[in-house]
Image (cartoon, helix red, strand yellow):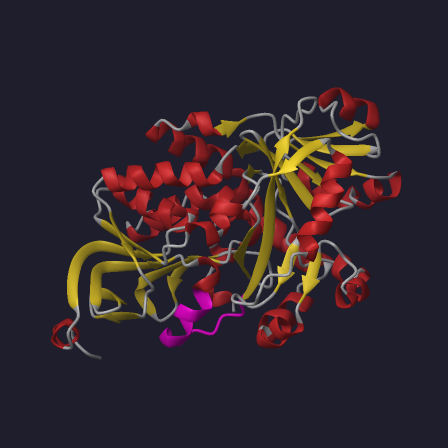
Amino acid sequence: MRSVKTIRDAGIVARPNDVVVVGAGIVGLCCGLALQERGLSVTLIDRGEPRGQASFGNAGVISPGSILPLAGPSVWRNFGRYIGGHEAAVRLRWSALAASMPWAIGFLRASNEGSQLRSATALAPFTAAGPSAHIALADRFGLRQYYRYGGWLKLYRDRAAFDAGKRERALLADHGIKAAALSAAELTDLEPSLDARFTHALWITDALSVDSPGALLERLFESFAAGGGTIRIGVADQIIQEDDQVVVKVGGEGFDGRFGVLAPGAWAKHLLQPLGYRLPLAVERGYHRHIDWRADTRLQRPIHDAGGAYVIAPMGDGVRVTTGVELALIDDPPDFRQLESAVAEARRTLPLGDDVPESTWLGCRPSTPDGLPVIGFAPRHDRIVFAFGHGHIGFATGPITGTIVADLISRRPAPVPIEAFSPDRF
């Protein structure tokens, strides 16, 4: 194994830190902030494409009820629709499926009731800690104004669809997650602007939401820099652990620390393979568009139309409409058909104004077969911590992930069980 001196002799000027974090989405940024809180010096290395991050483009929902992974019994019931491109919730690109075959095999193996129950049990304490971890971070930096209370709604278009969610409601109750079933009349009382086509709803009352995820991240970046943190924009070319140091190379520049944290989101696979790890990861892409309010419309909380597989989230002077999942390669050209369908359905659900110009967005999420994140020390590198694979819950669980990573590096017990998130499970 080469020494750090050899690396420097090769032309890399190393800048010492306690920890170097690769990836500055919500997860990496919260890792940096939590490490700073413990008195450690931190450098964040990021690709510098904030609008391309899932942290920027998500629906801003922070729900303790986000415990059901995509892999479950319903995958087999809807398999033909997925393959045929007839399901709004999931769109497949065959090129991506071929490139992600280890993920696809693992996902299908996990698509059963037992595996889904195990994943939900592992996720429950993790997602339950999400809202309080967000508020603790907001109180630390004076950012409460970005958060909205009032929960969020899952809407059903008929009794059969509502009845099909019986198992989900039972799981939520088993894990102490507060949820109220609403009739059509109760839903209208709560959100009078919604179209009358919804016959039932589930109200996750303890969920929070954020009215501008991108603005919140900008403020957290400012707080990180004000606390002495360094931010380096560039692509991490190489990561090396040597003895008691980790060196991250960005172009001709090197950053070394006593520890490294890999939180690169959807780019994880590209960094893992040179280190000798071949985890079964895939990329879930999602789209959104902003639409102006209409004068006679209001919406107090985000809503998820289970039948249309989209979310409408109130944000600023309008709403953000987000789509379901597109399984694609990270650099595939966009396909806006899923978004156009979601926007058309959203306009049936809520009276809306004009599309906001240049607000159409595409971003990527990292996905694991079992729907659980990867959090823990790398199996063969005792100074590199993995923190990626959060899928749809990255924004909601970014702050608690940061706390967990800081505790791992500080050799403290994690605040919630993380054994099921171990990289060794693959």
Identity of the residue drawn at 74% across and 54% down? 88
Please, is residue 326 above or below residue 168 in the view?
Answer: below
Please, is residue 399 above or below residue 96 in the view?
Answer: above
| Residue 5 image offset from top left, x and y in percent | 12, 73
Residue 97's quadrant in the figure? Answer: bottom right
Instruction: Please give left or right for residue 263 compared with residue 99 in the image.
Output: left
Magenta-span inclusion, residue 276: yes
Quadrant including the N terminus = bottom left
Front residue of 269/132: it is 269
Identity of the residue drawn at 78% across and 44% down? 165
Magenta-span inclusion, residue 278: yes
Instruction: Please give left or right for residue 372 compared with residue 214 in the image.
Output: right
- Is any part of residue 413 visible from this angle? no
Instruction: Please give left or right for residue 34 compared with residue 92 in the image.
Output: left
Please, is residue 163 above or below residue 143 in the view?
Answer: below
Write the start and end of the magenta stretch as one range.
268-281
| Residue 376 image offset from top left, x and y in percent | 40, 58
Q: Residue furthest top?
A: 189
| Residue 121 image offset from top left, x and y in percent | 60, 49
Identity of the residue drawn at 56% across and 42% down? 357
| Residue 87 image offset from top left, x and y in percent | 77, 57
Identity of the residue drawn at 53% across and 57% down? 364
